[in-house]
Structures are given as structure tokens and as C-alpha cells.
Image (cartoon, grey):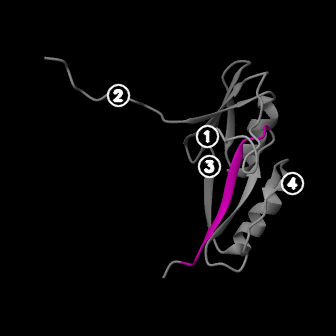
């Protein structure tokens, strides 16, 4: 009989490839209010609230997707905020950190919605808004 014990996983991390890992990690660390830990020349870990949040791996030939209106995305992150005003504030932060807006919201007056962005290496992510909890 095979041993069916669960693996002893210590950390779970999403890892982005980027041609410039310093720019990429600076963007995500500032956006998530985290810190960067360097693991050699080709790897960075971003810590948030005492745990790993994201990793960035050097990939000199990284080609960003052209999502949402072009080539299929590789993956994306969603960040949920309460109300469009919170999204507007996050938008300003993303732009000031070197991110860019890929697709604006279709209906900013809707109770729920999203806008699509790219980080400095071109990885897509969404700033989503939801109504105030009841």
C-alpha cells in the first residue's frame, strides 16, 4: 500500500517572470505594501504581513501577453476593493508605480465592476470593485 500522507508544503507563492526583476519587484512591493527579499541574481520574494505574497523570477526573454484584447493571458490577479472611489485611488497608485491601464471599466456606475491593468513587465491584473458589505 502506498503512503498517502499530504506533502508538507511550507509556502505557496505565485511567481511572475520578468526581464527586469528589480522594476517588477519594486512595483509589486510598493503596491502591496510589502518588502523585497533577494534570493540571488535571478529571484526575488515579496513579503506582505509576515508571509510570502509573490515571487519574481528573471526571464530575459519574457514576452507579455496582449490581454484582454489580444493574445491569451497567461494568468492574472484580481484585487477587490469596496467602491469605485477605492479603485480610483488604487488606479493612481498603480500608474505612479509604473503600471498601466489596459482596459477601463465599461460602467463605472455599476455596483460591481473591474478595470484591467498591467504591471511593468506586462502581467495583467484587475482592480475590481464590490458594494459596501451589508
Asked whether residue 127 is drawn in magenta, I would say yes
Q: Which residues are magenta?
A: 121-132
Q: Residues within 10 Å of mark 1 (few under 14, many from 20)?
A: some
Disc 1 element: strand
Mark 3 or 2 closer to N-term?
A: 2
Asked whether the beta carbons under mark 1 and mark 4 sit within 8 Å of each other, the answer is: no
Which is more foreground, mark 1 or mark 2?
A: 2
Find disc 4 in the rendering and name its residue: 96
Which is more foreground, mark 1 or mark 4?
A: 4
Which is more foreground, mark 1 or mark 3?
A: 3
User: Which quadrant would residue 88 be assigned to in this image?
Assistant: bottom right
Mark 2 or 4 closer to N-term?
A: 2
Is residue 56 placed above or below 104 in the rendered structure?
A: above
Disc 2 element: loop
Find disc 1 in the rendering and name its residue: 47
Circle on res. 77: 3
Q: Residue at x 62, y 49 (%)?
A: 77
Find disc 2 in the rendering and name its residue: 8
Q: Is residue 13 left or right of residue 88?
A: left
Q: Position of residue 32 (x, y in %)?
A: 67, 50
Mark 1 or 2 closer to N-term?
A: 2
Question: What's the CA distance linking mark 3 and mark 2?
Answer: 26 Å
Question: What's the CA distance linking mark 1 and mark 3?
Answer: 17 Å
Mark 4 or 3 closer to N-term?
A: 3
Amino acid at each position: 500500500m502506498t503512503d498517502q500522507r499530504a506533502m508538507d508544503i511550507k509556502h505557496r507563492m505565485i511567481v511572475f517572470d520578468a526581464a527586469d526583476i528589480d522594476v517588477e519587484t519594486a512595483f509589486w512591493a510598493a503596491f502591496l505594501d510589502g518588502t523585497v527579499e533577494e534570493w540571488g541574481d535571478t529571484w526575488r520574494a515579496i513579503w506582505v504581513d509576515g508571509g510570502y505574497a509573490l515571487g519574481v523570477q528573471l526571464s530575459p526573454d519574457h514576452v507579455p501577453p496582449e490581454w484582454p484584447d489580444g493574445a491569451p493571458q497567461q494568468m492574472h490577479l484580481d484585487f477587490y476593493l469596496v467602491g469605485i472611489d477605492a479603485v480610483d485611488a488604487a488606479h493612481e497608485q498603480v500608474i505612479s508605480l509604473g503600471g498601466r491601464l489596459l482596459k477601463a471599466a465599461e460602467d463605472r456606475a455599476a455596483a460591481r465592476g473591474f478595470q484591467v491593468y498591467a504591471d511593468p513587465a506586462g502581467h495583467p491584473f484587475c482592480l475590481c470593485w464590490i458594494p459596501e458589505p451589508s
